[in-house]
Amino acid sequence: MSDLPIRILERLYGLDLLKDAPKWWWVNAGSFEVVLGCVLVQNSKWENVQKTLDSLRRAGILPRFSGEFERDFHDEARNFEAICNIAALSKEVLSSHILGLQNQKAQRLILLARNLLEDFGSYEAITQNLTREWLLAQKGVGRESADCVLNYMCGREVMVVDRYTYRLLCALGVEIEEYEELQGFFMRGVEENLARVYALYGKGVDLAYVYARFHAKIVEFAKAKRDMRLIL
């Protein structure tokens, strides 16, 4: 069973599920938008999140990006300005851009932005020094959201697992309910089979990128409503 995660990755890789997706799957990965998306998507459809982010861009609250996960492109100044903009908004103004649970999410995002400014002071410091423990201490941020921020915004070697990951394993006869145990199972499966990972992505590939794509492939496979039992 120890090689099950890498076998799943190899199978998903061959299905070319992300051929039309951005390099890191998450649109504008590497930017503060990841934090916003993680909070906004709770109890909501991703389509509503996109509408909210588009509304914030049109209002000039968020910058407009058109590139991939590139630290030089997602410059520190524009991301820091976006955090400052959110932190300075009133709950009423921010909630007017949000679809679903407007007041709750607006309040949480404003507080989160203010805490980021107070505790880190710059976007570079955030991406370099942000911890899972800090994120989990924030209102409305759970384990999955925290790991999304660490991986898709900060480029850390952390794999996000979710209900799709759990259901996929269950379909293959393995049930791991506890989040950290499920996450560890997949990450060990990658780290203990680096030769097979390199055969797919090239020698020395950034594991943060591999984890980002692995999670994305599982999500896209599940959303396509394919029979998970046929993955192997």
Image (spheres, rainbow, N blue to C red):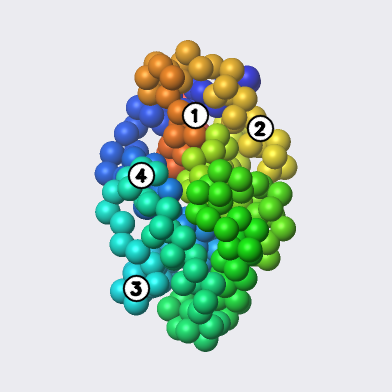
**Which residue corresponds to mark 1?**
207
Q: In which quarter of the image is residue 4?
A: top right
Residues under labels 3 and 4: Cα distance? 21 Å
- Picture layout, residue 88 above or below residue 211: below
Task: From the top left corner, tell me how far across and down residue 42 is, in percent.
Answer: 56, 64
Residue 60 is tagged as: 3
Tell me the distance, in whole angstroms, between the alpha carbons under discs 3 and 1.
Answer: 34 Å
Per the image, the residue denoted by label 2 is 184
Task: Residue type at mark 3: give it.
Answer: Gly
**Residue plotted at (72% across, 58% down):** 137
Q: Residue at x 56, y 69 (%)?
A: 109
The amino acid on which the numbered mark 4 sits, given as a three-letter code, is: Asp
Using residue 55 as the reference point, say whether residue 196 is left or right of it. Answer: right
Mark 3 vs 2, N-terminal side: 3
The relative height of residue 216 versus residue 187 in the rendered view (above or below) is below
- Of the image marks 3 and 4, the number of the one nearer the N terminus: 3
